[in-house]
Amino acid sequence: MDIEQKQTELIDYFVKQAENLRGDSLANLIIEATSHSSLFAFSEILSVPNLAQLQGTEYSIFLDVLRLFAHGTWSDYKSNAGCLPPLVPDQVRKLKQLSVLTLAETNKVLPYDQLMHELDVSNVRELEDFLINECMYAGIVRGKLDQLRRCFEVQFASGRDLRPGQLSSMIETLTSWLTTSDNLLVSIQEKIKWADTMGELDKKHRKKIEDKVEEAKKNLKKYTVSRRTWSYEGMRKSPMLNLEE
């Protein structure tokens, strides 16, 4: 089962569970979802109406936790740790994985120093182990570890939930990409049309040359026959070689 299908099934499961829970049961579900090793998208769960009912209650901090996992990073948690409940080890690992995905959104070459700072990792060995075991083996990123340049070259990274206000920017980016693609398609079609035209002209030019060559062959053949006939007639009428006698 690929990671996208697994994500879809997990999201469906947690959404259905959230629709039927309240209070502390819903808080426990949030902890379970944010700790799950194969779940990296939370916006669908966050949109369940029951979740909004946690706002203003003693369980509202768990709603903040879910928002953090949907849009935030490990650095965001550290900045707001006083307002949030302590995270269990599985949640810490998950939030650091999500932090790598956030960094990969804007840069495909991630310096080791930046990663170690963002993930609270003290040395390169620990960082590379995390990237290999917790990110690449998990299927959320693919890339190359460059020890010489001390960076991680990202070749693929799973997308995260859209942050509030990010939709307009994404629509604008996609619209720009679509316009560029349309222009590129028109340019390709024009080049194909030009190539077809040039191919047709080349075909006509080749045909014209072949016709001239064929005509030259015919003329040469006529000339050869005519010359032979002339030579024969000359020999017949020659006084030294009278073939009519």
Image: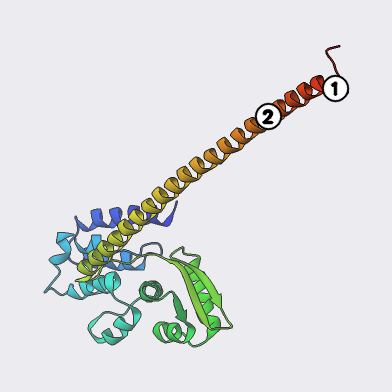
- For discs 1 and 2, the disc positioned in front in the rendered view: 1
Residue drawn at 44 percent across, 82 percent down: 115
Judging by the rendered image, the residue that carries numbered circle 2 is 221
Judging by the rendered image, the residue that carries numbered circle 1 is 239
Across and down, in percent, residue 135 comes to 46, 69
Q: Residue furthest right?
A: 240
- Left or right side of 228 for 211: left
Residue 123 vertical placement versus 190 (above, below): below
Residue 196 vertical placement versus 102 (above, below): above
Color theme of the render: rainbow
- Left or right side of 93 for 47: left
Circle 2 SS class: helix
Across and down, in percent, residue 181 comes to 33, 58
Displayed quadrant of residue 86:
bottom left
Q: Residues within 10 Å of mark 2 (few under 14, many from 20)?
A: few
Across and down, in percent, residue 101 comes to 38, 71
Quarter the C terminus occupies: top right
Across and down, in percent, residue 163 comes to 24, 70
Residue drawn at 22 percent across, 64 percent down: 46
Disc on the earlier residue, 1 or 2: 2
- Disc 2 marks a residue whose amino acid type is Lys
